Amino acid sequence: MIYLPFKKIISILKHKKRLLFFYFLNRVIYYIKGLLLYIYFSFFKKNINPSMFFFSKKVCLLNDVDLKILCDNYSEITKLLNDEAGGLWTHIIEDYYKEFSNNLVSHNYSSLRELIQEIGSQSFTKGISLSADVPKNIFEKGHLLKRFDFYLRIYNKVSLNKNVIFPTNFGRFHGLKIGNDFFQVSSFRHNYYAEKISSLLKVKNGNVIEIGGGYGGVCYQLFKSFKFKGTYIMVDLPIMLINTAIFLRQALPNKKIKFLTNLDEFIFENYDIVLIPNNLYSEKIIKNVAVAFNAHSFTEMDFSTTKMYLNSFIDIEPEFIYSFNHNLEYEYYAKGILKKLSSLDNKEFSSIIEKKYNLVNRFPELLQGESCKETLYHQKAYFEYLWIKKSSQYKMNSL
């Protein structure tokens, strides 16, 4: 009776020992590879090297009036509705956003200004391709240089415009300065998305709606690089939309931005950018949408949430649904319950979209780094999807 449990305990300990061994082995390989990459880019690459690493200015361009508006918007929306994340974002909000949220609620402008002047390096931007991409040592610098090199090469092959840009006058964002151009690591794919959206808008003009827009990178590229003239609608968690507002109000100071805090009637065309908290989202208020867009978040949400947004697209009826998402089906815990995220290849998701849309293409996302290896070796990766409305007057060969 005592022997069997003891044997099981020994087996568990051996298993954990193996896991620990492989963890340390992977870390050693990571550091060795990072060091070798750093040496390679330092001495053997002319177009990209460590001397090009650059931080934008440590400045906050928002004044007290701007900060008051942000605080009032956040306080108003969180008093009325619960700012509760779901999916993979639950622990990110809980772990990294407490100080930021408290400063917003308390209208602590001086603390907010200190955070905002280097928002590109703050821990609460970890999940939106900013602070997570700031290297802490030469090993991480080596890996980041490899990513930049990969993105630059692929971007130059797939982009027709090659006009990726990123602001340098605020935020202490980290990136590479090549000549007079500053590149943040996420700006390549954001510019690529914006270029594709711009090409779709040439087929059917109208507004754009993005679900889960991060710091606003695609919106910024679409206005700045492609001279978008419509209204860009972004739907996200309230705290994330504050991040978006902070970035866009500094990066696009001449654009009219509306942070929605109630469902009163207002005219979309009066604004360039409309930010809608997810807990206020209703397809009934969305007008004249040509492109519905999502990148890297549908498959990070709870199944029911993604399903809700897809059903809303059916009601909004944009000409195109354009998406970049993975099919990795991550598992995560929410309130002690193990949950599994689905992919857009899920039959229930595809059955919703196929009610009114035809799939034009589905192929591996080109600007997602290591996921290309996942595609080659594991048949799991990020994919680019494009659907067109079945009733569309436009033919596939015109796209």
Image (cartoon, rainbow, N blue to C red):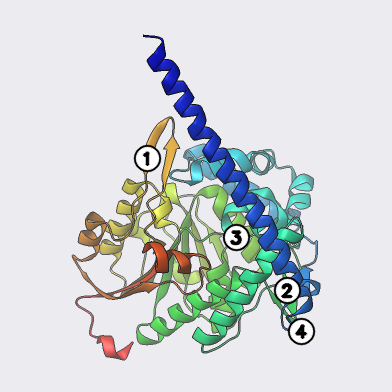
Label 4 or label 2, whichever comes before in sequence order: 2
Placement of the N terminus among the 4 image quadrants: top left
How much space separates mark 2 and mark 1, taking CA atoms? Answer: 42 Å
Write the residue at 40% across / 82% down: 201
- Above or below 314: residue 278: above
x, y percentage for residue 337?
Answer: 39, 32
Residue type indicated by callout 1: Lys
Of residues 15 and 248, the one drawn nearer to the viewer in this rendering: 15
Could you say where residue 162 lies in the image, as x and y percent from the top left?
A: 58, 86
Q: Is residue 173 visible?
A: no
Gap in angstroms between the C-alphas marked 2 and 3: 25 Å
Give the mark toward the camera: 2 or 1: 2
Residue 367 at least partly seen? yes
Residue 63 image-quadrant placement: bottom right
Residue matched to label 2? 40
Q: Which residue is mark 3?
A: 129
- The Cα–Cα distance between marks 3 and 4, rounded to whole angstroms, is 23 Å
Q: Earlier in the sequence, mark 2 or mark 1?
A: 2
Q: Residues within 10 Å of mark 3 (few under 14, many from 20)?
A: some
Q: Is residue 360 left or right of residue 153?
A: left
Of the numbered discs 3 and 4, the one sitting upstream in the chain is 3
Q: Choose the circle earlier in sequence order: 3 or 1.
A: 3
- The answer for how far apart the CA atoms under marks 4 and 1 are is 47 Å
Give the mark nearer the N terminus: 4 vs 1.
4
User: Is 162 in front, or is 331?
Assistant: 331
The residue labelled by disc 4 is 179
Residue 387 position, x and y percent, is: 29, 73
Count of marks placed on residues: 4
Q: At label 2, which amino acid type do we have?
A: Tyr
- SS class, disc 2: helix
